[in-house]
Image (cartoon, rainbow, N blue to C red):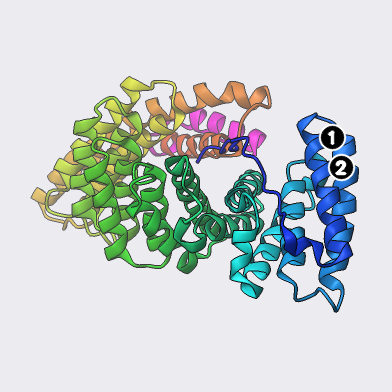
Amino acid sequence: MNKKHLVTLGLTLATATGTTYAQKSKIREANSAYDKARAALILDKKEEAEAEFNKAKAAADEAVANAETSNNASAWMAKAVTYISMAQLPNFQEQKTYKSGFEAFEKSVSIDPKIENKTSSVDAVVKNAGIFAFNDGINEFNKSNYEAAIGAFDIVNKAFGYKNGAYIKDNKAVFDTIQAQANMYSAYSSYYQKKYEEALPKLEGAIANPITAGTIDLYRVAAMSYGEQKNTAKQLATIEAAKKKFPGNKDIAADELNYYVSLGQQDQLMKKFEEAVAQDPSNAQYISNLGILYLNVATGKDGKAPANAEELFKKAEAQMRKAIELESNNPIYQYQLGNIFVQKADYIATQMNALGSTKADNAKYDGLFNLRTSYLKESLTPFASVVNILEPKQKSKSISPDEKGYLLEALQAMGKIYAAVNEPEKSTEAKAKLKSYE
């Protein structure tokens, strides 16, 4: 998921005025300082605005704390408009004053619902609280502070959803989009915290919302969340819905393959990999994975190879050679091709061990021995390619841990195979390299 840009709408913040504010001196003081701050902002005098906001804040705080005005709707509205407006200045943004501002707004209207009618531009109070909350939520999300992000996005919903969005009249499509994105990023935040029970209702809601329904990550994250819960039915249903909505998408195809991998359904997995390769024949990773899958099925469970093992070995080799044709310098594909020949050799060895001691069995044994030897010799070429690709990286100390693992495995295999095919000098050489690189 990409980082999200912030919303800038340049809305005018509300000013709370009227006869109610004349009731108490601290309320009048807060209102006066607020008006001066707004005037300074219009003239781009930020330092002066900041000073006046501090005065307004102090007066409003005192008003709501005072026993005589603590239950006064106008006092709380004075705090609301002051705190929310403060949030547009950089020095106040870290304090997240919009949060306390919206809480003060909720307190004000709970005391006197009619205060809204006595407050000019009350719609801007609601709108700006939501905008500041959204921008803060995105900042926290981008910093991976997911719990803080969720808290901010909750305020977006409260603000824009206040009275079922009664104050969201102009630019409604814009605000609907902001709210939908807030819900989507809140869902992602819950997912990243591994709170799947919390994330899934949000994810499903975002998928159902026409504004965010076209976001492929929602489906993928929902499917992964169901997978974490071991709800394989819902996981597959979500993947299937994504396939229908985003036909041909490679990420969804990969998710489907991983689903079948996790379940270990070999037959179904082979079918899906075959479909994936047919749809994307230049994808070396898919081709390689299909080759490995054929190999796994060919070797069977508990060492018991299936009746069509030889056919599967051939398919495995063919797929791995295709992958190498596409990416000849990929040491993993080279290693896997070498491993296919080793597994074929072991398959032949199993047949040899099952033979009796009759003359016919002895003749068959000799034929199988030669075949096994030929497979072992064939494995040496791709294993040598692994060494040729990775040894320079080893010497230049630029090799990754995974790459070094393949290098050591290839050298170990070569040491054993050369010994098995009666080439002791090459076996000793491979073993010496292995020891020097360990």
- In the drawing, does residue 92 fall left or right of residue 180? right
Label 1 crowd (10 A; few <14 / some 14-19 / many >=20): some
Circle 1/circle 2 CB separation < 8 Å: yes
State the image quarter where residue 113 is shown.
Answer: bottom right
Q: Which residue is mark 1?
A: 46
- In the drawing, does residue 221 fall left or right of residue 374? right
Magenta-highlighted residues: 419-438
Which structural element holds mark 1?
helix
Q: Is residue 264 visible?
A: no
Q: Is residue 193 visible?
A: yes
In the rendered structure, does residue 431 fall within the stretch colored magenta? yes
Which residue is located at x 77 percent, y 53 percent? 82
- In the drawing, does residue 193 fall left or right of residue 333? right
Of residues 357 and 368, the one drawn nearer to the viewer in this rendering: 368
Which structural element holds mark 2?
helix
Q: In this rendering, is residue 30 above or below 283? A: below
